[in-house]
Amino acid sequence: MYDPHDPDRPNVLAGLRIDRAGRHRRDPDWIAARAAAPEARSVLIWRDQTIVAPTAGGMTMALLAELGRLVDAAGDLLEDPPVFLGDMDGRPVFAVDVTRVEDLPGLIGRLPMDDPAMEAAAAIPIDLRQAAATLDPQQAALVAYGRAMAYWHSRHRFCGVCGAPTRSEQGGHVRHCTGCGADHFPRTDPAVIMLAHKDDWCVLGRQPRFPAGMYSTLAGFVEPGESLEECVRREIAEEVGLKIGKVTYRHSQPWPFPASLMVGFRAEILEGGPLDVDRHELEDAIWVQRDELKDPELSPVSLPNRISIARRLIDEWLAEG
């Protein structure tokens, strides 16, 4: 259950209990044996969406049994071999990108589900950000891992050094150039996300893409030659014109939309005052008082979804007042 007072709980999409078995990835025979194992399971990624089925309590992930049958059924529509994610609960789990499959219901309907009670006809593709709130936390984290790997493969089919095609190796954790021989590894872009605050006030901003009335914490990507703390101070200065003193790390969250690691901080504002909003970055930014945010009837804004680290940073601060 969501508890802003628990400092040790992992963020949504994190905390995956899986043995990634990195020491075995260089052994193609070992990977092949895991793929052929009768207990092998597969997570489907379709056009950056995952496949779920409605349940009484929300949603459950459509985990497919018999990986070999899936590979045979998809045939040439699979651009890459399945990606080995690791062993979970003693079973090998693979991510399979079926983006090129047009008749997704037809494909799923011909394959066995891990859960025999799940009806293939009820399975639907959905964005992970919508599904994560009701998925089992381990399922959500597993999908996030598989989605990130599928996205990386789809964007690195050619070598950035010489332009030649690349091929998937080491269970899908390396793309090897068929021209110059360069190896390319999965990409994660670090980004800072921070609650800027002073006394009982904090600063929240909104982007045009946000739902109406929603404001969130400030955030930005880390630039070359920059520490995380330096990035926090730079982004706040650029976006709202405030100077920051103490910067404190809180926790992090994998955020595969498309390929980020969100590193969460508290940032203490040195001096209050009017905000100098960079309209190229933000549509608006405002000061908000803690007591206002606590009371839905008084709050001038709505807050981000509870799956996000942004919401956790805000809720932790609210709980301290």
Image (cartoon, grey):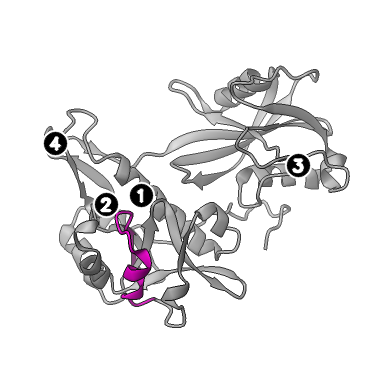
Q: Residues within 10 Å of mark 1 (few under 14, many from 20)?
A: many
Tell me the element at label 2. helix
What kind of residue is marked 2? Gly
What kind of residue is marked 4? Gly
Q: Is residue 270 above or below residue 21?
A: above
The residue labelled by disc 4 is 181
Tell me the element at label 3. helix
Q: Residues within 10 Å of mark 2 (few under 14, many from 20)?
A: many
Tell me the element at label 4. loop
Residue at horizontal 41 percent and vertical 52 percent from the top: 147
Q: CA distance from mark 3 to mark 1?
A: 33 Å
Q: Is residue 87 above or below residue 241?
A: below
Q: Are marks 1 and 2 in contact (CB under 8 Å)?
A: yes
The residue labelled by disc 1 is 149
Q: Which mark is residue 317?
A: 3
What kind of residue is marked 3? Trp
Question: Does the segment drawn in magenta span residue 98?
Answer: yes
Q: CA distance from mark 3 to mark 4?
A: 50 Å
Q: CA distance from mark 4 to mark 2?
A: 16 Å
Q: Are marks 3 and 4 in contact (CB under 8 Å)?
A: no
Residue at horizontal 56 percent and vertical 55 percent from the top: 130
Q: CA distance from mark 1 to mark 2?
A: 8 Å
Q: Nearer the viewer, mark 1 or mark 4?
A: 1
Q: Residues within 10 Å of mark 3 (few under 14, many from 20)?
A: some
Q: Nearer the viewer, mark 2 or mark 3?
A: 2
Residue at horizontal 28 percent and vertical 39 percent from the top: 156
Q: Which residues are magenta?
A: 91-113
Q: Quadrant of residue 25?
A: bottom left
The residue labelled by disc 2 is 172
Q: CA distance from mark 2 to mark 3?
A: 40 Å
